[in-house]
Image (cartoon, rainbow, N blue to C red):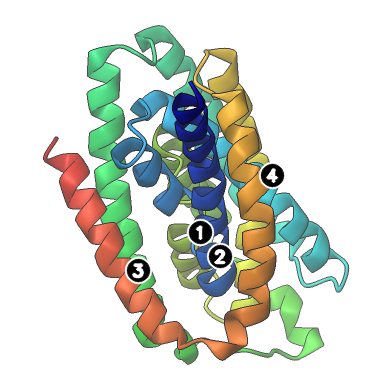
Amino acid sequence: MLGIYILRLMHEFAFVFAGFAVGLVVGLTGVGGGSLMTPLLIFVFGVKPHLAIGTDLLFAAFTKMGGTVSLARPRVVDWRIVGQVAAGSIPASLATLYLLQRLGPANPATQTLMTTTLGLALLLTAIATFYKAVRGKAAPTRIAPELIDQATRARHWALPVLFGAVIGTLVTITSVGAGAVGVIVLMLLYPALPLPRIVAADIAHAVPLTLVAGLGHASIGSVDWPLLLKLLAGSLPGIWVGAHLVHKTPDRVIRSLLSMLLAYAGAKLISI
């Protein structure tokens, strides 16, 4: 009896440790937790894809809320960009949720759609992560205050909405895409904007998107609430530790290794 209790306790602690590990990597690299946590839940813990995705969406929303608050205080979040991208991502997320509800999240066909799309999203994230590892220093780091207004205007008003819709659909189906992929999209749309402001806008946009998508998944029964609490118990201190170690670690080496790990997980999901 005691042995069974110890095994259960170790199993519960494993989720907390997994949350800490993912939070640590997010704090070190800025890569979204979805690209790490979702495949970890599926492959290591055997969580069903729809539950892993739904739970991870709320996991991402709560972990990035603190980051958004800390970034909003020094006014580095460009809310115009957040609003433009959200104008496409939020409606696309709601439409995707409606489709998932009609199909049934536990339906075998829906599960196949989720795992295949998740695999493709992980491969895309791996490419984006590797690109940032190789070319990350090429982006501007500062901009004159009088040029910020011009730098936050896209070439055409429809482009942020269109790309936002793609990200919203991808995130809702897979929980992946709001991090590394979102940063690359913003770098393409706003090339004159400094990288810190791009990252800040990406994190701020991820909060309402993952919250809407996560609550939508919860409404169709695709969220494991006890699991979510265990993951958050580990991730919040993990992000704090990672943020304090970020200047003491070789960023390019970590991102390169991480991109290979994501590529492996993506290929494995596609082959299921």
Q: Position of residue 58 (x, y in %)?
A: 61, 36
Q: What element carries label 4?
A: helix
Amino acid type, callout 1? Ala
Tell me the amino acid under the disc marked 4: Phe
- Which quadrant holds residue 246? bottom right
Identify the residue under disc 4.
62
Whether pointer 2 and pointer 1 mark residues with C-beta atoms closer than 8 Å, the reply is: yes
What residue do we see at 32% from left, 42% from top? Answer: 44
| Quarter of the picture holding the C terminus | top left
Give the CA distance from mark 2 to mark 4: 15 Å
Mark 1 = which residue? 21
Mark number, residue 258: 3
Q: Nearer the viewer, mark 1 or mark 3?
A: 1
Q: Quadrant of residue 82?
A: bottom right
Q: Which amino acid does label 2 sit on?
A: Leu
Q: In this view, does 62 lie to the left or right of 57?
A: right
